[in-house]
Image (spheres, rainbow, N blue to C red):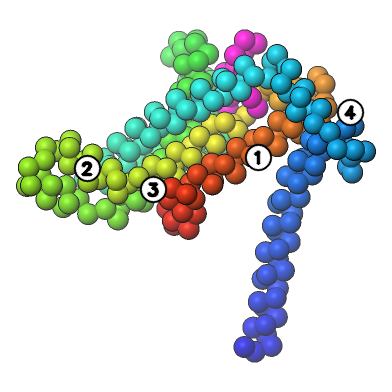
Amino acid sequence: MTLIERFASVLVWTLAAFTVVFLLTPLAVTVAVSFGSSAVFTLPAPSFSLRWYEAMGRSRDLWPAVATSLQLAVVSTLIALVLGTLAAIGLLRGRFPGRGAAVTFLVSPLMLPGLVLGIAMLEAFRGAGLRSVWASLILAHVVITLPYVVRTVYASLSLFDFTLIDAARILGLSYPKAVVKVMVPSLAPAFVTSGMFAFLASMDNYPISIFFTNAWTKTLPIQMLQYVEESPDPMIAAVSSLLILLAMLVLLVGDRLVGLRRMADL
């Protein structure tokens, strides 16, 4: 290895380490503040305490928001998995003009700013006469979770040999059974990966949810924003720490079921 190659390698690893530290420092600070005893955001904390996690348990507004976000994330993820899989199959197997444009359109919510997308959906729902908060939230969250499913399942389907389904039918299986027994197990890693990212995207979404919530139905990010505006204290850090833990658990489950390397390849 020449001197220039060594210098380049050291520079790359230095930049990578700096990037990791830069991205993880706010998370570490948030977790550290959540275990402090101070009533304000202080680091280092005067002493170790679980008072803010206990305050979470006593909060009357937090847990309804958590339940709303969990229900919304689960329902929207399941709907996105079904619709996204059907769309991916149709786009891959179909032969029609504008197929590439359709693929781009389905993943376009990932490219647009959330506020722009939220305003557009708000006007569209009003024009269609949709007034239900729950229906609006579910539709909006399906729109933002669908791209994760379409993109992941489409990439996995492009590697699937559809002649295996024909072989299963020749052996006596009906078409639906052949799909369930042959194609679904092959696409299981794509389902797990896309479902995890869709769930986390729904749980953490703020810029779109804010247009469809009201005083009685609030998602967790909206409730956290209200806490920051009205009574900012380290309880927000405790909630954020649990969200960080949730993301880590989801990744751990994904690693056990699929493997992080395979998830990255998808």
- Left or right of 124 in this view: 7: right
Q: Secondary structure at mark 4?
A: loop
Q: Is residue 91 visible?
A: no
Q: What residue does disc 1 label?
A: 244
Question: How many numbered callouts?
Answer: 4
Q: What residue does disc 2 label?
A: 181
- Left or right of 189 in this view: 97: left
Q: Is residue 265 visible?
A: yes
Are the residues at dot 2 and dot 1 in contact (C-beta closer than 8 Å)?
A: no
Kind of residue indicated by mark 2: Lys
The mark that comes first in sequence, 1 or 3, is 3
The mark that comes first in sequence, 4 or 3, is 4
Q: Which residues are magenta?
A: 208-221
Cα distance, mark 4 to mark 1?
Answer: 22 Å
* Numbered badge on residue 189: 3
Nearer to the camera, 209 or 16: 16
Residue 200 x, y percent position in the rendering: 55, 36
Cα distance, mark 2 to mark 1?
Answer: 36 Å
Nearer to the camera, 22 or 40: 40
Q: Secondary structure at mark 3?
A: helix
Residue at 53% across, 13% down: 133
On the rendered image, what quadrant is the N terminus found in? Answer: bottom right
Cα distance, mark 3 to mark 2?
Answer: 15 Å
Cα distance, mark 4 to mark 3?
Answer: 44 Å
Q: Is residue 211 magenta?
A: yes
* Numbered badge on residue 39: 4
